[in-house]
Amino acid sequence: MTKADSGSENPRNLWDEIIALRDDQREDRKGAIQIVKRASLPPEKNDLGLMRWYMHPSLPKLALSTLLFYELEIPPGSRSGRLKFQGGQVLFVVEGKGYTVIDGVKHHWEAGDVLNLPLRRHGIIIQHFNADGENRARLVATEPNLLNCTTVDRGSGFELLEKAPDDN
């Protein structure tokens, strides 16, 4: 502890600092975005596939920052990248049919289904496949935004094990 922290001269008041932080956060949220329109989201081609981010820690001025939320599109007959991460993610199948391999076990899905990816201490390995050779598959995913409080590795690692093919 420094002299200022020990209470002898100009002691810090951590309660007041929390109140100041609250006030700063409230000010920052004024005019925050309440509705994110899909039409306004640019598709992003990355190593996981073709994505649209609705909620992400780097997107400013969202009303809520406690979730990650994105759409993943998989072209006909293709697949996503293969990912190792903590798990604890829920995906809703908007359209299409296919399957997800979770730690080597295949789980089939179709439009209207929900995938509940388990949260595991040492992480999980997943990859999504579009089983339809003529139509795309679209999934939306959400999970708690733990990136800021637990780091991106979240205790289990966060590694892309295989890129999505270039046709995504």
Image (cartoon, grey):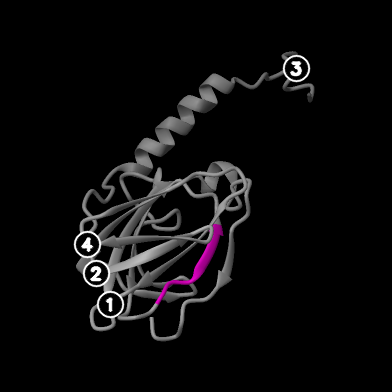
Graded by Cα atoms within 10 Å as few (under 14), some (14 to 19) or many (20 or more), the crowding at tag 3 reads few
| Quadrant in which the N terminus appears | top right
Q: Residue at label 1?
A: 132
| Quadrant in which the C terminus appears | bottom left
Q: Residue at x 55, y 41 (%)?
A: 149
Graded by Cα atoms within 10 Å as few (under 14), some (14 to 19) or many (20 or more), the crowding at tag 2 reads many
Is the residue under label 4 in contact with that under label 2 (CB below 8 Å)? yes
Q: Residue at label 3?
A: 6
Graded by Cα atoms within 10 Å as few (under 14), some (14 to 19) or many (20 or more), the crowding at tag 4 reads some
How far apart marks 2 and 3 lie (CA) works out to: 62 Å
- Amino acid tagged 4: Ala
Q: Which residues are magenta?
A: 79-84
How far apart marks 2 and 1 lie (CA) works out to: 7 Å
Residue placed most toward the observer, 125 or 12: 125
Q: Residue at label 2?
A: 96
Q: Residue at label 4?
A: 111
